[in-house]
Image (spheres, helix red, strand yellow):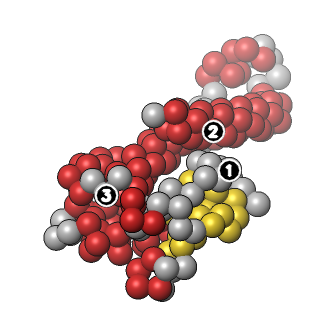
Amino acid sequence: MKNIIIITGIVLFSTLFSTKSFAQSSHSEHKENSSSCCSNKQKHEKASCHKDEDHSAHKQGNLTEHNHAEHTKSALFVEYFKLKDAFVRSDFEAVKTEAQAIEKTARNHKFNQLSKDIYLAKNIDAARIVLSKLSEEYIILAKESKVGLYIAHCSMALNNKGANWLSLEKEIKNPYFGNKMLTCGNIVGKTNE
């Protein structure tokens, strides 16, 4: 639970920071555009010009969409770590439940089909194969979002093909082997480097 709170905090902090920067840049652009919109209406006061102006083309209208997208990303990371922890415990019922939660959160996102493949898997070993693909997609999302998460790797996973996963901490808790080889693997990087 502590790990979920930490990742939520990290994602929300990055969301707030990017939202604040976005809002400031939109406000600056609005100020620049306001002088040109009023130039043809010199008889009107500045306030009345802004009141009558059509603001639909300004970027500030997208702020809600931006916040929704960031909230969805945050929720996706929270669900991923719940799923990964279920794999670490080798709890197949919890794996299926958490995969369904990702599918619901993802909706049209590329994670949707992979999470569905996990909860429809016949056993936990089949689900772990899909986990490797899902983890790679999450690593891409974490890098794009500049969220500081650890990338862990186990070279023995998936019949020695190797597989990665995201971790909130340096301590290895292998989702591909669970209790059989809980600490097998190593940290190979961070998503914000």
Q: Secondary structure at mark 1?
A: loop
Q: Is residue 40 shown left or right of residue 11? A: right
| Residue drawn at (20%, 69%) of the image | 123
Q: Which mark is residue 10?
A: 2
SS for dot 3: loop
Disc 1 and disc 3: Cα gap in Å?
A: 26 Å
Up-down relation of residue 51 to residue 21 (above or below): above
Q: CA distance from mark 1 to mark 2?
A: 8 Å
In the picture provided, is 111 more to the left or to the right than 117?
right
Task: Provide the residue designation for mark 3.
Answer: 90
Q: Amino acid at mark 3?
A: Ser
100, 42: nearer the viewer: 100
Disc 1 marks a residue whose amino acid type is Gly
Pick whichever of labels 1 and 2 is earlier in the sequence. Answer: 2
Judging from the image, what secondary structure is the residue with disc 2 in?
helix
- Within 10 angstroms of label 2, few (less than 14), some, or many (20 or more) residues? some
- Left or right of 2? Residue 58 is right
Indicate the amino acid at tag 2: Ile
Residue 192 at what x, y percent from top left? 72, 56
In this picture, is 125 found above or below 141?
A: below
The relative height of residue 1 versus residue 84 in the rendered view (above or below) is above
Contact (CB < 8 A) between labels 1 and 2?
Answer: yes
**Mark 1 — residue?**
148
Circle nearer the N terminus (2, 3): 2
